[in-house]
Every structure is written in structure tokens, then in C-alpha cells.
Image (cartoon, rainbow, N blue to C red):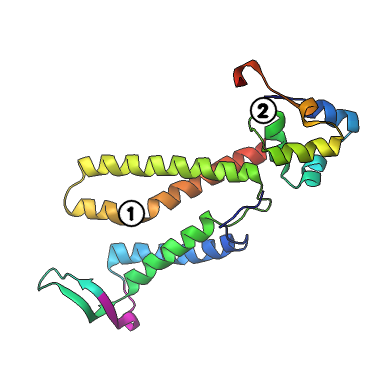
Amino acid sequence: MKNSLKVERAKKDITQAELAKRVNVSRQTINAIESGDYNLSTILALKIALVFEISVNDLFVLEEKDL
Amino acid sequence: MKANYLLPQKFKIIGIALFIPTLILAIMFLLYDFEFSFLDVQVFSIINDPVIGDVEYFKCIKNNITNELLSVFAVLSLIFIAFSKQKIEDEFVANIRLQSLLAATYINYLVLVVCILFFYDLSFLWIMLFNMFTLLIFFIIRFNVKMIQLKRK
């Protein structure tokens, strides 16, 4: 699963720590999601999408290997 | 995500504070047969199978409970350290906990199987004694190493 977290963060000028605080997780969790080391839950994906005011589908995209 | 069945964060400190004296007394007990004489008490036993004599069931017996108390404190302190919440206990930490528990279980039973095959008689009893605690110890090591690695990233 690919994600555009880093891009969206840059657009809104939000650090990993700020995003983590807003969705109530640790900075390490955001870092792991961003680097693709951790597949997050649906509820966390929805919460992050809400912060960026975009759809989850715009933030997370399935890759060929996931299918 | 709500983390269920975990103890409050302060239990980790309580666990460490309890584990250190327990470990020191346990080493003294194992190496020098150290016992507190005031812990010579009457205890209720479901089964008592002494080296010399017959098996007794559901009887009150006289016993020094130093080693029993040390075992209980060791289990409690390790559980406190292992299963107390992190400062931020989120779904990623829960995932690392689960992976660590799985890894610790595999390692623990792999070591036990090797010991079953290569340790005999009294030495195997020592292995069983340590095996009561190794699952928790392996879990604590694996989980904390992973958490430290994460914090460094």
C-alpha cells in the first residue's frame, strides 16, 4: 500500500509529531505508516484523512502486490 | 484503538522496584539456601509429596515460604513490567506487543525443546524452574528492544 502522507503533510505544513498528536498516536507510528512499515487500521486511516480534509482513497492507494 | 487488559503505566516502575530485590534474594536463595526464618509457617497444601515419606492430600504442613513468596513476586513483577501501558499506547504498539509475544513464545519453546533433549535429571528441574519466567523475560527483552529501535528512527 502506497501513501501520500508526506506530500499531504508538506502541503499543510504539518510535522509528524503534530499529526500524531491530532490523531492520538505516537510520532513513531506516523513515521512507520509513512515509510510503509506498518499497515494502519481503517479507523486511523479515516482520522488522518479527516485531518487533511481529503478522502482515504486519495491518501492510501493499493499496489499491485496487495491484490 | 483501546488497548484492553493492560495495566496502568505506573505499574512498570512498581514492577522494576519489586523485581530487583526479588532477583537479589532469589540468587541468594539459589546459591546459599538463604531463607527468612520468620517465614516458617503452617500452610495448606493440596498435594505434598516429600522426598522421604508418603504423599499427603489436603493437609496443613509446616513449610518455609521464602521460595514461594519469591516465585510469586517474580511472576507479579515480570507481569507488571511486561503488560503495563506505554506513554502512548496506540495500535502500532499493540501490533509490536503481539509480534513480540509470538516471537517470545517461539523462542521460549524452542529453548525448552532443546533443553528437554539435552538436559537430564536434576539439571532438567533447574531448566523447568527458569522456564516459569523465561517467556515473560523473552517478551520484555524483544518488546523493549523494538520500542527503543523505533524511538531512534
Q: Label 2 vs label 1: CA separation?
A: 39 Å
Q: Quadrant of the C terminus of chain B?
A: top right
What range is drawn magenta here? B35-45
Crowd band around label 1 with a 10 angstrom C-alpha radius: few (<14), some (14–19), many (20+): few
**The numbered mark 2 sits on a residue in which chain?**
A
**The numbered mark 1 sits on a residue in which chain?**
B
Q: Residue B25: in sight, yes or no?
A: no
Q: Residue at x 30, y 44 (%)?
A: B112
Q: Classify B20 as above or below B100.
A: below
- Name which residue type carries label 2: Gly
Counting from the top left corner in percent of width and height, residue A14 is at 86, 36
- Report the disc number at residue B130: 1
Q: Residue at x 34, y 65 (%)?
A: B28
Q: Residue B36: in sight, yes or no?
A: yes
Q: Residue at x 69, y 37 (%)?
A: A42
Which quadrant of the structure image shows residue B59?
bottom left
Counting from the top left corner in percent of width and height, residue B9 is at 63, 59
Circles 2 and 1 on the same chain? no
Counting from the top left corner in percent of width and height, residue B95 is at 58, 41
Residue position marked by numbered label 2 in the rendering: A36
Q: Residue furthest left?
A: B53
Residue toward you, B32 or B113: B113
Q: Residue at x 18, y 55 (%)?
A: B122
- Name which residue type carries label 1: Phe
| Pointers 2 and 1 in contact (C-beta within 8 Å) | no
Q: Classify A38 as above or below B111.
A: above
Q: Is residue B135 left or right of residue B10?
A: left
For the residues carrying marks 2 and 1, which lies nearer the camera in this image?
2
